[in-house]
Each structure stands twice: as C-alpha cells, then as structure tokens.
Amino acid sequence: MPLKLEGKVALVSEVNGVAAQAHSVIAAEYRGLKVAELDDLRTKARKDQVYLRVVKNTLARRALEGTNFAPLGDRLVGPLVLGFSMQEPGAAARLFKDFAKSHDKFQIKAVAITGQVLDAADVDRVANLPTRDQAIAMLMGVMKAPIEKFVRTVNEPVAKLARTFAAVRDQKQAA
C-alpha cells in the first residue's frame, strides 16, 4: 500500500534523525530473501543496536541529505535495506557480513562511515573495527605499558641485590 504524503514526510524525518546520530550505514540488496529470513535479520539487528529500515531509494536519498551520509545517495539502486550503526561504527557491518555468509541472495552494495563512502568489498575493514570495550582495553594496555616498564626498572636493583645475596648464600652452603 503506497504511503501518503504525511507518511512519507514522517518516514524521511525519522530516517534523517537516525542518520544524523549514526556512526555508519550499510546498504544491502535483499531481493530473493524470505520474510522469515528478514525477520531473523531484524531480530539480530535489535540485539546489536542496529537500526534497520527498508525505504524507497528516492525517500532514502532525501533522508540522507544534510547528514554525513549524503554521498551514499548515488549508490542507492534496487531494493535495499539500510542498516545504521547507532552505538559502534562496525556493528552494522558485522551484522550484514555475518548474515551475507549464510544467505547468498543478500548482497552488500555500499558502506559509508563518517561521510566517506566505501565499496562493498571494504565491509571487512569496517566490520573488523574494534567494539567500544575492545578499544578501551587496547587503550588501557597502551597507557599501562610505560608504568609497568617503570615499575620493573625501579624494582630491578632490589631484585638483583636479592639474587646476589642468594647466590652468595648458595655458594657458602656448597663450600
């Protein structure tokens, strides 16, 4: 059933608001998938905090205007589902990549991250971005390394003295 003008305006406004807050967006062609398969994708998307929306391409282009993802409008051709990563930049890419592995008819068409449009082949790069928790862990590791090195350096003279005393003790006991 076609949307009336009010419905289209509301849809464009909703998608525009989501796009303004999103970190990345993935467009994929879903032609040939069954409704149950798309429902499975939607369920996984909700769990991963990915906003999924099937929108007509003309409405999607209008919705993306004024956002970082406006350049993606040229690549919107065919029946597409748009996935917006709301929390982590790689969430939608990981979701779509995993879904495409098990569904041959699901084809990723374009990836956009912070205003830069990438080819579908670059979805692996975006999907391999660390999650927020992984990034924090990596940062903590980098911040902790110099402190650990300093503590080991400060502790080394005392440890060397203890080893020297132990060696002298062992040598006297052996004699």
Image (cartoon, rainbow, N blue to C red):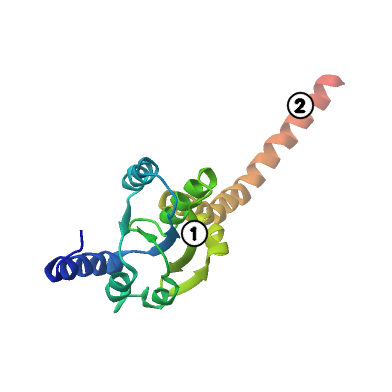
Q: Residue at x 33, y 64 (%)?
A: 22
Circle count = 2
Residue named by callout 2: 169
Q: Residue at x 76, y 26 (%)?
A: 169
Residue that extends furthest to the front in the rendered view of this protein = 1
Q: Position of residue 151 (x, y in %)?
A: 56, 49
Q: Residue at x 37, y 41 (%)?
A: 40
Q: Secondary structure at mark 2?
A: helix
Q: Position of residue 102 (x, y in %)?
A: 52, 43
Q: On screen, 158 above or below 24?
A: above
Q: Nearer the viewer, residue 138 or 157?
A: 138
Between circles 1 and 2, the one closer to the viewer is 1
Q: Please state which amino acid type lies under the numbered disc 2.
A: Arg
Residue 71: quadrant of the picture: bottom left
Give me the disc on residue 36: none
- Give the mark, 1 or 2, whose residue is nearer the N terminus: 1
Q: Position of residue 5 (x, y in %)?
A: 14, 71
Q: On screen, 160 above or below 32?
A: above
Q: Nearer the viewer, residue 10 or 44?
A: 10
Q: Badge 1: few (under 14), some or many (20 or more) residues near its Cα, within 10 Å? A: many
Mark 1 near mark 2, Cβ–Cβ under 8 Å? no
Q: Secondary structure at mark 1?
A: strand
Q: Nearer the viewer, residue 58 or 93?
A: 58
The reply, left or right, for residue 3 in relation to residue 100 is left
Q: Position of residue 14 (x, y in %)?
A: 21, 65
Q: Residue at x 56, y 53 (%)?
A: 145
Residue that extends furthest to the right in the rendered view of this protein = 175
Marks 1 and 2 sit apart, C-alpha to C-alpha, by 71 Å
Q: Please state which amino acid type lies under the numbered disc 1.
A: Ile
Q: Quadrant of the N terminus?
A: bottom left
Give me the disc on residue 108: 1
